[in-house]
Image (cartoon, rainbow, N blue to C red):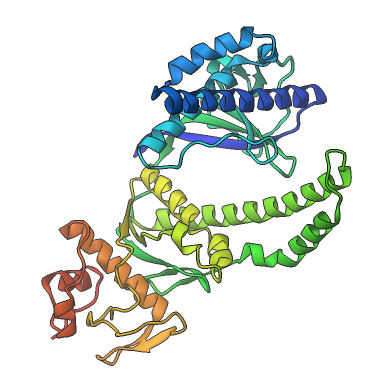
Amino acid sequence: MKKQVKRAFKFRFHPTDAQAAELARTFGCVRKVYNLALATRSQAWTLRQERVNYNATSAMLTVWKRTEDLAFLNEVSSVPLQQCLRHLQTAYTNFFAKRAKYPRFKSKKQSRKSAEYTTSGFRYRDGRLTLAKMAEPLDIVWSRPLPEGVAPSTVTVSLDTAGRWHVSLLCDDVIEAAPAPNAAVGVDAGLDSLLILSTGEKVTNPRHERADRARLARAQRRLARKAKGDDAKNRAKARAAVARIHAEITDRRRDHLHKLTTRLVRENQTIVIEDLTVRNMVKNHSLARAISDAAWRQFRTMLEYKAEWHGRTVVAVDRWFPSSKLCSICGAPAEKMPLNVRSWTCRCGTVHDRDINAARNVLAEGLSVIACGGGVRPQRENSRTRQSSTKQETQRTTAGIPRRP
């Protein structure tokens, strides 16, 4: 089965000095326009209770370009400036929908340096990409070819803190969905093991950040010893060295998660995961570093969009479902289950590995959600009396566990 999706292909490129200067000016203008529009919209609401939309800020941009103080905005392509106003409108939409916080001003040092070009702002011919206001095409390192007959609809150029230039090409692509296997798997996220599957497999946690922790600490100490100031070139070099180590850690983590999620999607038709609130979990300062290194949220994001591409089903069970405390054989709950308990024996005599048992319960709960509807949980009364409810029997039967006599 073929499916048309939007895919982004990201590549490194090496700009000339003139191109780097042009892109640096563009990044600065994008940041300036974004901050001006944000300040205008905030003041309009604070002073006059007036809502300013994208069309109004677009008209303001034309006026700003005609002023003497902002005449430099005419030196760069107008497309990225219009796009940053659209991004601000999206930020407000997410804020009013309570999906995000109120938009913040872009910082020269801390904000991401990027510029987005639509079809009117670039030319792509015969594998050569030329941006507006540039005479020469970008020297792109084509680590993989674009799909045949595919042309980008949007181009985003960015410069990361490690000094690496990237170009992302958003394309309309047709994906050949992988054959649908008749298999389901429950996934329990962990720290000792990155993932624990209901099949009993434990995926090793590479601990990417811990592997480079000593090297990162040395680089950060060197940075702390450098003098601060606009002319402190040695400090800038030390900061770039720290950023490069962070970038290497991020790249390894992303590569590992891509391979892992692709494998899960290709081997299973239904994938059941836990609905973890990572944002709240990292407030535990004892585990925050390990949780961030595991990147559970990034894993779920990758899994969901790849599942959508290939027609798979991803189910997230309720975050309060007691997967670790329930016996996957008889359904009886354990009274207490502190984190230091890695194996336990149920009243029915079954010895459980904590993580594998949790993954099996997650799978059973997810399959019951599909069969009976969302938000269904085991009945505590039946579990305490060790009598099976209809829903619990459905879980065990669907997961391939025989019924109790």
Q: Quadrant of the C terminus?
A: bottom left
The residue drawn where x is 24% and y is 62% is 367
Q: Nearer the viewer, residue 347 or 109?
A: 109
The residue drawn where x is 37% and y is 35% is 96
The residue drawn where x is 29% and y is 84% is 334
**Left or right side of 390 for 67:** right
Q: Nearer the viewer, residue 257 or 125?
A: 257
In percent of width and height, residue 31 lies at 62, 28
On the question of residue 184 being in view, the answer is yes
Q: Nearer the viewer, residue 84 or 14?
A: 84
In percent of width and height, residue 317 lies at 30, 61
In percent of width and height, residue 192 lies at 53, 74
**Left or right side of 215 for 274:** left
Q: Quadrant of the N terminus?
A: top left
Q: Residue furthest top?
A: 66
The residue drawn where x is 21% and y is 57% is 374
**Left or right side of 395 for 353:** right
Image quadrant assignment for residue 161: top right
In percent of width and height, residue 195 lies at 47, 67
Image quadrant assignment for residue 69: top right
Q: Tally the numbered discs.
A: 0
Instruction: Give the answer, above or below, for where 28 lies relative to 3.
Output: above
Instruction: Give the answer, above or below, for where 52 lies relative to 368.
Output: above
